[in-house]
Amino acid sequence: MGMVGSPRKQHGGGGGSHSASFLLGALLPTLLLFLLASDRVGERLASISTYTLGNNNGSSSAHEQMMTHDANLTDTEERVFPGLAELLPRVATDDGTVIITSVNEAWSRPGSLLDLFRAGFNSGEGIAHLLNHTLIVAVDPGALAHCEAVHPHCYLLEVTSANVSSANRFMTRSYLELVWAKLELQQRVLQLGYSYLFTDVDIMWLRNPFRHISLYADMAVSTDRLHGEMDRVCTMHANCCIGLENKVHDLTNMAADWNNYTSLAPPERRDSGRTWTAPAQCEESMS
């Protein structure tokens, strides 16, 4: 299950057999999106402080202490995330929303997941502009070099406590270190006043998922549901798949299916009866 939240303001700028285990996400993908309404985080903290102390004088004092603590925390986090505050304004949409994904050296090599991820935006329906609002977080210097060769907005988040440069299996130590590092960066994005939408890099965007996100929730949760209709698909996620080569192989087939579909005239699309190629290597990896 993935999580999505949406701020109160409009997203003007951001705006699925065995095959099901791979082609999940005819509307929204699992483990795809996590977005908080950053403009309401301070409001929430203040209300919690007031509720906890139960009186105005106490809540005022607590609020002042909180602001002092937050100022000290901000200085520390600026050292932990150098340059992030200056980069985000160049990436964000007009309403302050940033799309975030992350890569290591293995995922960002030419012909690997990063290339497929970016190609999805360019071949998708009306979403190429969203690449300009996508921050690619590199977790090692090799990934940063690959990213900067193809994408305008890259940020180095070094994870030094584990080897994250190669493909990491689910729930291994390196995998968990990477998860926590990404969460800390996402928290920092919120503290800087931005909302974000987090997407795994093994997801291909084909249509705009912002259209499916409520505008009035602080946080929303996306779930996968396979419908299979090419005229409705929004994103496709290579989950339930072990091994980087298997992901790349079957995502490449999926991208070819999409390109063949979109090359047809609208009447031909409706009558073509086209289906997705079975993700054979991902199926094999799970057997």
Image (cartoon, helix red, strand yellow):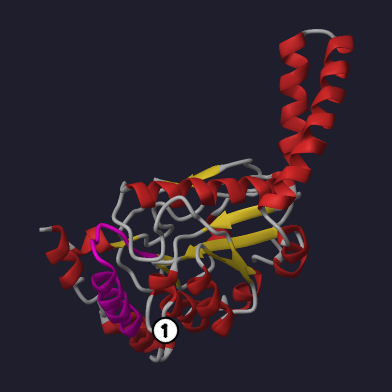
Write the residue at 19% across / 72% down. Answer: 278
Q: Nearer the viewer, residue 58 or 10?
A: 58
Label tally: 1
Q: Is residue 30 above or below residue 56?
A: below
SS for callout 1: loop
Q: Is residue 237 magenta?
A: yes
Image quadrant where one finds the N terminus: top left
Residue 95 in the figure: left or right of residue 176: right
Write the residue at 43% across / 86% down. Answer: 266
Q: Residues within 10 Å of mark 1 (few under 14, many from 20)?
A: some
- Would you say the magenta stretch is mainly helix, strand or loop? helix
Residue 275's image quarter?
bottom left
Residue 236 in the figure: left or right of residue 144: left
Q: Nearer the viewer, residue 118 or 76?
A: 76
Residue 63's image quarter?
top right
- Residues in magenta, as a range: 236-257
- As drawn, the residue found furthest toward the left would be 287
- Per the image, the residue denoted by label 1 is 110
Write the residue at 65% across / 61% down. Answer: 98
Q: Is residue 42 above or below residue 245?
A: above
Q: Nearer the viewer, residue 106 or 51?
A: 106
Q: Position of residue 72 (x, y in %)?
A: 79, 37
